[in-house]
Image (spheres, rainbow, N blue to C red):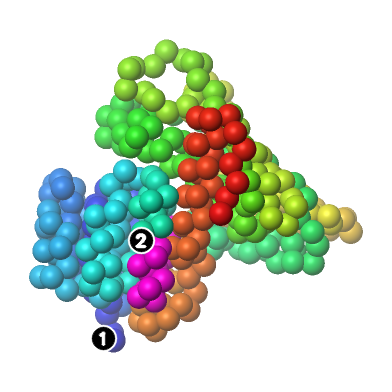
Amino acid sequence: MADKVKLGFIGCGGIVKSHLKQGLGAFPDVEFVGWCDLRPEAAEERKAEVGGKGTVYTDAAKMLDEAKPDAVYIMLPPFAHGAAEDVVLERKLPFFVEKPVAIDMKTAQKVADAVKKNNLLTSVGYMTRYRQSVQKVRDLLKSQKPVLLHGGWLGAGPKTYDGIGKWWVQKDKSGGQFLEQTTHTIDLARCLFGDVESVFAVAVHGRKERPEFFTIEDASMVQLKFKNGAAGNLYSACCLGTAGGVMLTVFGTAMRASFTGWENTVAIQTAGGEKIDIKGEDNIFALEDRAFIDSVKAEKNVGILADYADGLKATEIACAANESMATGKVIQLA
C-alpha cells in the first residue's frame, strides 16, 4: 500500500468532527479523498476542517467509485445503517463503523455474514476498550472469577428536539437510549465479563411530559446473565433533574473496580489491599483511529480491539433488551 491511506466518509455529522480533531486530522499517513452526506453542507464543514481536501458527494456509491478510497468510515445514526454498508461490502473495502452498528439484528447479521465471507478488516467505535483503565481491569480479571457488575448512563436527555435530539428520542430511529448510548457500557461489560446468555429488561415511562414524537423510554433497567455464571445490571435514564453520569462498578472474586465519567477513570481495590487509580485518556479517538489506520496499512489486524463481530454482539444484547421491555419475558441469546 502507498504511504498514505486514502479515506472516504459516509456520514459527516458531529462524531466525524471528534475523530478529525483528536486523531485523523493530525495523522501524516492519511489522505482525505471523499465526504458523503445527504446534507452536503455537513460534508463541506468536515472537508473545511482538513484544509479543503477531498470531494463532496451525496451518493455513497459514486464517492467510492470516483474517489477510490482505501478504507471507509461509516458514521451514521442507527436507523440509517444497511445501504451504506452494502456499497462498501460490494467493493470489499475495509471499514470503520460508529456504534451501534444497526438498529436491528437483521441488518447487523447481514453485514456480519458478508464481512466474514469476504474476510474484511473492520473496526467499531467502542473506543473505551482502548483505555489503560479497561485493559488493567481486564488483565486482573484473568486471574479470578467475575462476579457482578452494575452501571450505565444517567442524564436529563436532549435539551432541544432538533438535530440529533429529534431522531434520538424516536424509538424507530435510535432504538432507545440503551441501544444508542448505553451501548458503550454494554460493550464494556462484554469486554470484561464475556458473552451474555440471557437478558431481562424493565422500561420506565411517563416520568415527564413529552412531545408526541418522544417514543423512547424515560429509563430502563437491564439484567444480564453471562455465560460464565456472572451477573450484571445496566441502567439508563434520560429524565433526571439531578447529577447522573457514566459509571460501571465491577466485582471479581479478588477485586473491585469503579469506572467513572465518560473518560472511564478507574479506582481499583484488590483483595490484598492494593489501590490503583488510572485516569482516562483525553485522546481516545486517536487511539482507536491509529489502530484502524495501522491495520489497513498492514492489511491485517495490528491493534483493533473491537471488530464488527463485537458490534454485532452488543447490538444483539440491546435488541434483546428492547424485546424484553416489550414482552416482559427473559430473552435467551443465540
Q: Quadrant of the N terminus?
A: bottom left
Residue that sits furthest to the right in the current view: 272
- Magenta segment, which residues? 111-125
Residue depicted at x 40% and y 63%: 112
Residue depicted at x 38% and y 82%: 299
Residue depicted at x 23% and y 72%: 91
Q: Is residue 72 magenta?
A: no
On the image, which quarter does residue 152 sit in?
A: top right
Q: Is 128 left, or right, of 62 in this rendering?
A: right
Residue 320 in sight in this render: yes
On the image, which quarter does residue 295 sit in?
A: bottom left
Give the percent coordinates (x, y) of residue 60: 17, 59
Q: Secondary structure at mark 1?
A: loop
Q: Nearer the viewer, residue 232 or 114?
A: 114
Label 2 crowding class (10 Å Cα cut-off): few <14, some 14-19, many 20+? Answer: many
Residue that sits furthest to the top in the current view: 209
Q: Nearer the viewer, residue 264 or 107?
A: 107
- The residue at which mark 2 appears reads as 111
Q: Secondary structure at mark 2?
A: helix
On the image, which quarter does residue 190 sit in?
A: bottom right
Q: Amino acid at mark 2?
A: Val
Residue 49 in sight in this render: no
Q: Is 266 left, or right, of 16 in this rendering?
A: right
Q: CA distance from mark 2 to mark 1?
A: 28 Å
Q: Is residue 117 magenta?
A: yes
- The residue at which mark 1 appears reads as 2
Q: Nearer the viewer, residue 94 or 30?
A: 94
Give the percent coordinates (x, y) of residue 171: 38, 32
Q: Amino acid at mark 1?
A: Ala
